Image (cartoon, rainbow, N blue to C red):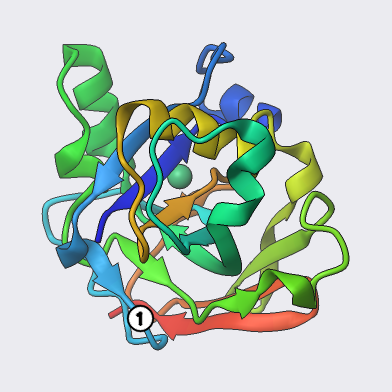
Amino acid sequence: MKIICIGRNYLPHIKELGHQVPESPTFFLKPDTSVITCNRPFPLPAFSQQVEYEVEILVRIGKEGKNIQECEAHTCYHELGLGIDFTARDLQKKCIEQGNPWEIAKAFDGSAVISQFIEKEAFEDINNLNFHLDLNGTTVQVGNSGDMLFPIDRIIAHVSQFLTLKEGDILFTGTPKGVGKVAVNDRLEGWLEDRKLLDFRVE
Ligand code: ZN
């Protein structure tokens, strides 16, 4: 199983990090050892002074495919979820400055928090899905899937030119603005529409 994460998919978040607007989806991978499920606590790593949450809509790939056409992409997934792409922002800045790959900032143990998955038919319109994240009871990130620069089907078409997608692979579809630092004992709660899918602590 692999985790494919889309970077820079919401304009206000690109601006808050001072990045360029991409012409095609940028993506990176996280290994299976990064996964946390069932709302288990997130262990804050000691090697970073600035670990930040990024709440994102998740897509679980339902069948194997390569070179998938955008118009066929909807047949490749049936389930959506919510996740946190934990990012060691201080290390990521260094990687970017030095032109190094991002793994130490993005692929560390626990960096992929994954909720349960819900059948996509349970939602009226997957291109108009509201989601939000609360930190210690205060809403810090609000997003809508309609604001993605690259919608889910386009992401799948793009990524599958390079990587064969397999059943069980998970896409992180990018984060809206409002990312911020976490500390020990913080509580994070995430909603996809009116469903609370994330509720865990930092330890
Ligand atoms: Zn992200």
Residue 182 lies, with reference to residue 178, above or below; the image says below
On the image, the x and y values in percent for residue 102 come to 22, 33
Q: Is residue 116 visible?
A: yes
Side (left or right) of 16 relative to 151: left
Tell me which residue sits at (38%, 69%) in the image: 113
12, above or below 189, in the image: above
Closer to the camera in the image, 45 or 123: 123
Residue located beneath label 1 in the image = 37
Image spot of residue 38 (x, y percent): 39, 88
Q: Quadrant of ligand 1?
A: top left
Q: Quadrant of the C terminus?
A: bottom left
Horizontal side of residue 122 vs 110, given as left or right: right
Place of residue 81 in the rendered image (x, y in percent of width and height, measured from the top left): 57, 69
The foreground one among 69 and 83 is 69
Q: Which quadrant holds the N terminus? A: bottom left
Q: Amino acid at mark 1?
A: Thr
In the displayed structure, 192 sits above or below 154; it is below
Occupied quadrant, residue 111: bottom left
Which residue sits at x=27%, y=37%? 90
Crowding at dot 1, Cα within 10 Å, few <14 / some 14-19 / many 20+, comes out as some
**Residue ID at (84%, 53%):** 128
Towards the viewer: 60 or 15: 60
